[in-house]
Amino acid sequence: MATVSLRFQPVPEHVRTARLVAVATARRAGLDEARLDEVRLAAGEVCARAVRRSQRAGSSQRLLVELDDGGTGFSVQVTDHAEAVDLEEESFALALVRGLADVVTVLDGPAGPGGVVCLTWHSRTSSPGGR
């Protein structure tokens, strides 16, 4: 179960709010400042990606951002309702976040492929390889 859930219209103005809430929740999960920078960048990128996908698909359905600070780290899950996929842009956006989060998973969403992106940061004590 998510610690914090946000729903917002797919417009760029709301990405900043989602990013700020993600960082505040990650801070509460005990991530250090370097990891908070990773969360800030990655959460902003996947939210912006969801906005772009929704706008390209003409979807006005709200995006869902679920943040979880329970367990052994912190996770962000962003769900959109877009059907269209621009593979070139998808590859770039997801490559960026793969370098920031410990685990990145892309799943089918309510409207099709790539509609859910899950990012996870493990706490330093539980991460493989001490990342």
Image (cartoon, helix red, strand yellow):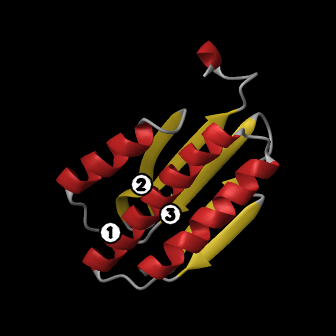
Hey, which quadrant is residue 74 in on the image? top right
Q: Secondary structure at mark 1?
A: helix
Of residues 122 and 112, the one drawn nearer to the viewer in this rendering: 122
Crowding around mark 3 (Cα neighbors within 10 Å: few <14, some 14 to 19, many 20+) is many
Amino acid at pointer 2: Asp
Amino acid at pointer 3: Thr
Distance (Cα) linking label 1 and label 2: 13 Å
Q: Is residue 39 visible?
A: yes
Left or right, 89 with reference to 43? left
Q: Is residue 82 visible?
A: no
Q: Secondary structure at mark 3?
A: strand
Distance (Cα) linking label 2 and label 3: 9 Å
Left or right, 76 with reference to 82? right
Q: Which residue is mark 2?
A: 108
Residue at image coords 28%, 53%: 90
Crowding around mark 2 (Cα neighbors within 10 Å: few <14, some 14 to 19, many 20+) is some
Q: Which residue is mark 3?
A: 79
Q: Which residue is mark 1?
A: 53
Hey, which quadrant is residue 114 in on the image? bottom left
The vertical placement of 61 against 44, above or below, is below
Do tag 3 and tag 1 residues touch (Cβ < 8 Å)? no
